[in-house]
Image (cartoon, helix red, strand yellow):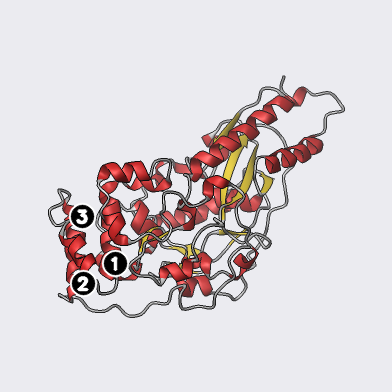
């Protein structure tokens, strides 16, 4: 039975309240409903693409207007259900202390546990099926950063937060340490009030903290300079000028969030899947660099890290080892990879050895990072 055929006692508002309750049972911190008009965001996206700031992320432009027009991506879409799920892992090491330990690897906090795509998608699917039980057959599609979706503008329009100067979504009572997910639906659920303008004010901590100065202006990120892009999305060699600035960050970067004052309100996750797995939090660079491909695949099974592949994994660690302090053990570990069959890996290993030996290297001008700015309390 189609939802529009319900009797006079049917209330979309009542259904939405029940939907909120079911979302909370599934572990979502918040749920909102947005419309599908993203015309202003479409213009901003096109300007960003025209400037080439997406780098090698060709998929950002591949689907044309489907990214900003939900009804083109999923015909019949009337609304989007947007959800937030906290991911700050309670058991993780203090991030600033870890960033200061140059011989240890820093992995973005979101990637320490199970791949969030799988966790959110399963729970969103259960939420969509629950909704089907209430209204009968309807059209829907579930998304978790897996299709051309403008998830942050959608979440903003659903009242889940505003887009900060670092281009991440921020909520005044939850900070920004959360994942987003969406369900495109053909049901006329009541929409929520959009979060409206930014509440970042004159603050520019995220801009000042970015090690590679990737936030080129408030609310404008040049992905080509972003450490998350360089260590995850980029498939080839990391540009030499950025390598010394990456420090010990081998998968992603959290600096802009670590200094955001709103994150003093962030909440620790209650989802066990997001707790650190396989000893990846605070592990030494030498140990990680020693993983052969079979061990890499085994240790990263079910993790977002696996998408790197072994060669890019070694590429990133080689850069971090080049930035580490004096260590004969690191030098030896790097030399042991000089015969690696992948030319990209060897090039980064040679760069790291040259940097450690001061060959043709100049110390980069100091760029502020999260270590330089006032600390923000971690979630409790």
Q: Residue 205, how many percent across, how many down?
A: 52, 74
C-alpha distance separating marks 2 and 3: 15 Å
| Residue occupying image coordinates x 25% and y 74% | 326
Quadrant (top left, top right, bottom left, bottom right) of the C terminus = bottom right
State the residue lying farthest toward the left: 339
| Residue occupying image coordinates x 48% and y 66% | 95
Of 269 and 355, nearer the camera is 269
Q: Which residue is mark 3?
A: 345
Apparent side of residue 53 relative to residue 363 in the rendered image (left or right): right
State which tag comes first along the sequence, 2 or 1. Answer: 1
Q: Is residue 80 above or below residue 132?
A: below
Mark drawn on residue 243 = 1
Apparent side of residue 287 relative to residue 180 in the rendered image (left or right): left
State the residue lying farthest toward the top: 1
Is mark 2 in CB contact (under 8 Å) with mark 1?
yes
Q: Residues within 10 Å of mark 3 (few under 14, many from 20)?
A: many
Whether residue 52 can be seen here: no
C-alpha distance separating marks 2 and 1: 10 Å
Query: Tag 3, which secondary structure?
Result: helix
Q: Which residue is mark 2?
A: 355
Of 169 and 114, nearer the camera is 114
Query: Tag 1, which secondary structure?
Result: helix
Of 45 and 158, nearer the camera is 158
Q: Residue 89, how many percent across, how many down?
A: 54, 55
C-alpha distance separating marks 3 and 1: 14 Å
Q: Residue 318, how many percent across, how many down?
A: 25, 61
Q: Is residue 352 above or below residue 272?
A: below
Image quarter of residue 191: top right
Apparent side of residue 118 relative to residue 102 in the rendered image (left or right): right
Numbered disc in front, either 2 or 1? 2
State which tag comes first along the sequence, 3 or 1. Answer: 1
| Residue occupying image coordinates x 66% and y 49% | 29
């Amino acid at each position: 039975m189609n939802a529009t055929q319900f009797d006079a006692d049917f209330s979309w508002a009542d259904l939405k309240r029940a939907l909120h309750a079911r979302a909370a049972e599934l572990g979502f911190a918040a749920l909102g409903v947005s419309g599908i008009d993203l015309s202003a965001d479409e213009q901003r996206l096109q300007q960003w693409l025209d400037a080439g700031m997406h780098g090698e992320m060709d998929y950002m432009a591949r689907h044309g207007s489907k990214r900003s027009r939900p009804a083109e991506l999923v015909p019949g879409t009337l609304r989007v259900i947007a959800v937030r799920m906290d991911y700050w892992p309670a058991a993780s090491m203090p991030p600033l202390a870890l960033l200061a330990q140059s011989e240890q690897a820093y992995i973005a906090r979101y990637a320490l546990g199970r791949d969030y795509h799988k966790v959110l998608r399963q729970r969103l699917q259960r939420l969509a099926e629950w909704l089907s039980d209430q209204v009968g057959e309807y059209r829907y599609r579930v998304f978790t950063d897996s299709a051309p979706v403008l998830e942050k503008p959608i979440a903003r329009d659903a009242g889940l937060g505003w887009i900060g100067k670092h281009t991440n979504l921020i909520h005044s009572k939850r900070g920004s340490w959360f994942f987003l997910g969406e369900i495109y639906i053909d049901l006329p659920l009541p929409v929520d009030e959009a979060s409206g303008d930014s509440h970042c004010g004159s603050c520019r901590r995220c801009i000042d903290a970015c090690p590679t100065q990737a936030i080129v202006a408030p609310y404008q990120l040049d992905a080509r300079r972003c450490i998350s892009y360089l260590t995850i999305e980029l498939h080839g060699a990391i540009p030499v000028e950025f390598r010394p600035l990456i420090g010990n960050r081998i998968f992603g970067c959290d600096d802009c969030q670590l200094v955001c004052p709103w994150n003093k309100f962030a909440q620790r996750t209650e989802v066990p899947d997001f707790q650190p797995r396989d000893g990846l939090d605070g592990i030494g660079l030498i140990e990680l660099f020693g993983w052969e491909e079979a061990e890499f695949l085994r240790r990263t099974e079910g993790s977002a890290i696996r998408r790197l592949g072994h060669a890019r994994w070694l590429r990133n660690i080689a850069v971090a080892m080049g930035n580490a302090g004096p260590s004969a053990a690191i030098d030896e570990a790097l030399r042991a990879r000089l015969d690696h069959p992948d030319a990209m890996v060897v090039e980064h290993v040679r760069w790291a050895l040259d940097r450690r030996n001061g060959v043709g290297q100049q110390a980069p001008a100091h760029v502020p990072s999260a270590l330089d700015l006032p600390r923000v309390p971690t979630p409790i």
